[in-house]
Amino acid sequence: MDTEINGYPGSLDRKRIDALDKRVAADFSKYVDGPTEQQIEKTKENLAMWLAASVMIADGKLATSEQNAFEAMFGSETLEKLVDFLSGLNTLEVDESIHERVKASGEELEGVIPGRFLDVHREIESRV
């Protein structure tokens, strides 16, 4: 931000520049930061969901307590979709499919927040 107003036309005084700066900042937040943050949150939630699914299937079965914990984190609709998805696969396919999705969602998250990826990934793992 330019803090000097010398050399600008007389119609641009400090108050007007500050008001314009605020409008630009608001628009930036609305049209750039907002959608970007939404995409980051969606990607983080996707990774968390697949990591939680990975934990759930680690012992080869879907225990009721694990399903309840998953449902508390992601909702009944997501749990239902996951169970439907997994029920159509054999044991080997379940492991491979979950692993592939964990890997893909991790790569997607790293693509949107490369500098913070490791810290955010650790935080997500600690939640699930």
Image: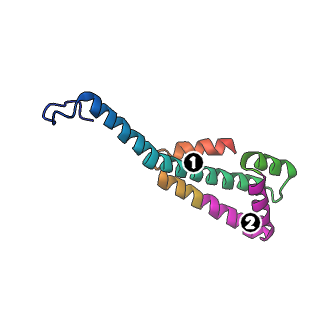
Q: Nearer the viewer, residue 72 or 100?
A: 72
Q: Nearer the viewer, residue 63 or 68?
A: 68
According to the picture, the residue beneath numbered tag 1 turns out to be 41
Name which residue lies at 49% across and 50% down. 35
Mark 2 nearby-residue class (10 Å; few <14, some 14–19, many ≥20): some
Residue numbers of the magenta segment: 76-103
**Mark number, residue 94:** 2
Q: Is residue 9 above or below residue 94?
A: above
Q: Position of residue 67 (x, y in %)?
A: 81, 51
**52 left or right of 68?**
left
For disc 1, the neighbor class at 10 Å (few under 14, some 14 to 19, many from 20) is: few
Quarter that holds the C terminus = top right
The reply to whether the C-beta atoms of the residues labelled 2 and 1 are less than 8 Å apart is no
Q: Position of residue 23 (x, y in %)?
A: 37, 39
Q: Residue at x 27, y 34 (%)?
A: 17
Is 101 one of the magenta-colored residues? yes
Judged by depth in the image, the label closer to the viewer, 2 or 1, is 1
Horizontal side of 11 relative to 79 (left or right) equals left
SS for tag 1? helix
Q: Mark 1 is on which residue type?
A: Glu
Figure quadrant of residue 25: top left
Question: Is 47 contained in the magenta span?
Answer: no
Query: Residue 106 location in percent, x, y?
Result: 57, 55
